[in-house]
Amino acid sequence: MTMFNLTTDQRVDKALANNFLRQATRRATDRLRNNKYKASDELGNWEEWRNAGETIRKHVIANLDFYLHQLIEQMEQRGVHVHLAKTPADAVGIVRNIVREHDAKNVLKSKSMISEEIHLNHALEEDGAAVVETDLGEYIIQIAGEPPSHIIVPAMHKTRQQVADLFEPIAGHALSSDTPTLTRFARIQMREQFLRGDIGITGCNFAVANTGSIVMVTNEGNGRMVSTLPRVQITLMGMERIVPSFRELDIMLNLLARSATGQRLSSYTTILTPPKKSADSDGPEEYHLVILDHNRSEILGDKLFRTALNCIRCGACFNVCPVYRQLGGHAYGSVYSGPIGSVITPLLEKDWKKWGHLPYFSSLCGACTEGCPVRIPLHDLLVKLRMRKTQSGHTPQVEQQIFKAYRYLFTREKTLRRALRLGAHLQRPFVRNHRITGGPPPLSNWTKSRTLPMVAPKPFMQIWADLNNKR
Amino acid sequence: MTNTNEFINHLASKLGRPTPTETPPPVEISVPQYRLSNTEERASIFLQNWQALGGKGAIVKSENDMLQCLKEWFGDLPITWFKDNPQALIAWDMLPSIAESAFSTLNWPLTRYTQSSLDPRDRYSIAAHAELGITGSDLGIALSGTIVMNSDPLRGRVVSLLPPRHLAFIETTKIRNNLFEVLEEISALGTPPAAIEMISGPSRTSDIEMDLSIGVHGPIEVYVVVIDN
Ligand code: SF4
């Protein structure tokens, strides 16, 4: 995956140079955002729904051990195989074993961010299974070998021509690039796969603790296919994805559908309470639930960041983020992008070296916080993450030196004055129209695309003193 | 693999207290819910919303209405389909009686899904090759134009999924105002069925350039007959 091999700066430059990507991202996020506004305004009391959503999520997270235990008990009583995975490697191992045990050749997948998080496909393919992503967007990026660029619309960055080019070698003939043709091709292509699938792997939007149910929403219907046709089903779930009962589910489904795509309900909302009853004609005979921790328990124990677990993965924060809207998802370099991706990736992956740039992918304008249906204080969390990163000593040497110098100067009045005078002198060659427009590194990192206000020829302290003298 | 107690205890330690032994008191929820005044209004708003999503629909009051409506939607197609494929019309074992009698009057031969084959793989394939899947509904939601179907041995989940067209029947009295009422009613029944399917309109995607396309995996055409009895 080339994107993953680039540095952050290279990824950003690449995104900024890609006009289609930027236009498409803006157009798509505009659309999603406006749809959301319509759907939330329509309720007339969106803030009350948000309150309810926030309260429910906080309650679940504060009692996560209880509800998770209840869910596991319910599931196991009915004969579902529940697997608990501490790490992504554990989760991959569990799925791999199930696939091997059944000697499964055809694995069908409907959308699951957890499977992206644990990089599942690659491992299964290594074992010789054919893995088919059945969500149209996921299918496109699977063929392209790319990670999703948006949590709800994974192939947002692709043009229809690019999609046609990706489909053509599979079709074995030329395809016109209109969307109905491409959609029909995917339908026909996938039909055969659906009927051949040995194992279905799905994600989970919510798990209902007191009934032991899994709730899945899709618009295409692929989630229903994958959870009905194969004989064995595996559901992957992040351990925080819980609601206590159907009562709270109502609120969460409303918030999710309206925030994600502006629908009142997604086309297909499926509540599975597996496994199937023995007399039922359809549905998988064997059901596995894999629950993933992957440092979520660390976040749970960290009061500063616990609210990050409240996320329902609706994507609303992506659509309003000025940084996301300029760059698209790939510039982040992480599986989860957008504001919530910038928050959870460093916490899940615990690698400042690799993910330390993410808290800075924000203008701190607060639009994400405003847009979040469960009121996660995203911009606040981003600031706190910057603090964490600094505390852990992972900021670049130059930055550390600059802040040391800053502290040194601003705690010594005389030295500060001298430094300002020196600055006023040194800046001269770079000043145009009262702005600093160039300079040596590290200043040039800033001035290559922006300007800085010049150091005032007469410092404020001097002006103040003069005023006092005149009086 | 980790064992359950270890996993749960680890979370409790992160939360800084032992795991509660009783169900925590549920949070208070007060959101003003969408409500209509009567069955008639619910039926008509349901229909309006279903149509806005791209589905076809009609309210029928008698068997005659029903016949007309089916003829208008499908004409002689079912007879033509039948010539190529005797299992073109695939249905639940039981449909509302007014629908059953309409089909026999029209002489449209229905294949009952659960009896179509003993082997589930064969049944899936039969449903995938059918032209029209025919089902009832357990509940409906006016606000979102949604039909709700519980799985059951006499039904088959794929009847509403694999054929390119889906025709559903729903009695006006089964239509509720909102999702909350539907979920409340289902949870009152105890353990939920293996699958509850809520369907709002045809299968759709906007995955390519945000351009809305209908019918990527599920049915392309969806029809609902609202029975006002
Ligand atoms: S952080 Fe909030 S807005 Fe962003 S995806 Fe999660 S729930 Fe949606």
Image (spheres, coloured by chain):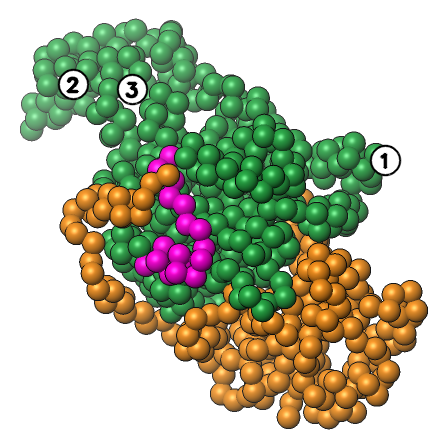
Chain colours: A green, B orange
- Is residue A80 rendered magenta in the image? yes
The CB of the residue at mark 1 lies under 8 Å from ligand 1 = no
Q: Residue A455, percent across and down?
A: 28, 17
Identify residue for label 3. Answer: A395
Q: Which of A36 and B219 is in front in this view?
A: B219
The residue mark sitting in front, 2 or 3, is 3
Question: Label 3 to label 1, Cα distance in Å?
Answer: 52 Å
Image mark 3: chain: A
Q: Residue A63, percent across and down?
A: 25, 55
Which corner quadrant holds the C terminus of chain A? top left
Q: Is residue B94 shown to the viewer in this render?
A: yes
Q: Nearer the viewer, residue A156 or B129?
A: B129
Identify residue for label 2. Answer: A407
Q: Total marks drawn?
A: 3
Q: Is mark 1 on a helix, strand or loop?
A: loop
Q: Quadrant of residue A206?
A: bottom left
Image mark 2: chain: A
Amino acid type, residue under disc 1 in the picture: His
Q: Is mark 2 on a helix, strand or loop?
A: helix
What segment is highlighted magenta in the picture?
A: A70-88
Identify residue for label 1. Answer: A173
Q: In which quarter of the image is residue B153?
A: bottom right
